[in-house]
Amino acid sequence: MGDIQSELKEVIVFSPRVFGDSRGWFMESWSKRDLEALGLNYEFVQDNHSFSAQKGTLRGLHFQMNPHAQAKLVRCARGAILDVAVDIRKGSDNFGRWTAVELSAENKKQLLIPRGFAHGFLTLTDDAEILYKADQYYFPEADRSIAWNDPIINVLWGIDDPILSRKDQDAPLLADSDANFIFGESL
């Protein structure tokens, strides 16, 4: 796995090695050994698979509160998405800053989003399928959202009227969120 740090050093973009020939291609989509060689020690416990039928569907910005925070390794297996991570660790120099990368079936890139960051994505194509690993199980009581269009965060989604769930329509601003991440605390 080749890695590239994003604008937020803890959020890492991976470009897996792809081996192709006339029959198609093969890649390792995840290797614990490769991550550990980079000093990244995650014990992923759950795989999630998301499907969005329409271009312009926006999911996020989501996170789970401590002690149920999740790190995620996200990839797009069909179509394309704009994948976004936002630093929501109080006391961080990057608090409220975001980074984004296009993930697609074609480029096969993946985004590693550590604990203490909110996550969201916008579908850039119809019929987008997203797969991601999480290092903590889903815990409904810890599930939270932040408004996708929070003016302080100001993610440049490139869309004014996305398709949203009721949960995402009603999400609070970061300033009103009960996010309990503190920069420098072990998550």
Image: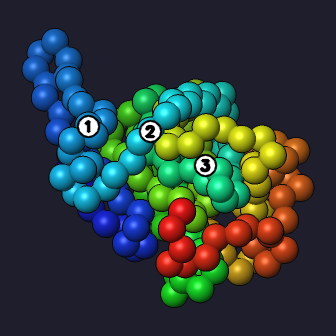
Is 122 placed left or right of 34 in the picture? right
Find disc 1 in the rendering and name its residue: 31
**Labels 3 & 2 near each other (Cβ < 8 A):** no
Q: Position of residue 117 (x, y in %)?
A: 57, 63
Find disc 2 in the rendering and name its residue: 44
Q: CA distance from mark 3 to mark 2?
A: 24 Å
Label 1 or label 2, whichever lies nearer to me, is 2
Report whether residue 17 is seen.
Answer: yes
* Category of crowding for the residue at label 1, using alpha-carbon neighbours closer than 10 angstroms: few (below 14), some (14–19), many (at least 20): few
Q: CA distance from mark 1 to mark 2?
A: 11 Å
Q: Amino acid at mark 2?
A: Phe
Label 3 or label 1, whichever lies nearer to me, is 1
Q: Give the image quarter of residue 65.
A: bottom right
**Circle 3: element type:** strand
* Residue at 21%, 45% in the rendered image: 34
Q: Position of residue 50 (x, y in %)?
A: 60, 31
Sequence-wise, which precedes: disc 3 or disc 1?
Answer: 1
Is 52 placed left or right of 129 in the picture? right
Q: Position of residue 169 (x, y in %)?
A: 85, 53
For residue 65, above or below residue 90: above
* Category of crowding for the residue at label 3, using alpha-carbon neighbours closer than 10 angstroms: few (below 14), some (14–19), many (at least 20): many
Q: CA distance from mark 3 to mark 1?
A: 26 Å
- Quarter holding the C terminus is bottom right
**Circle 2: element type:** loop
| Numbered label attached to residue 122 | 3
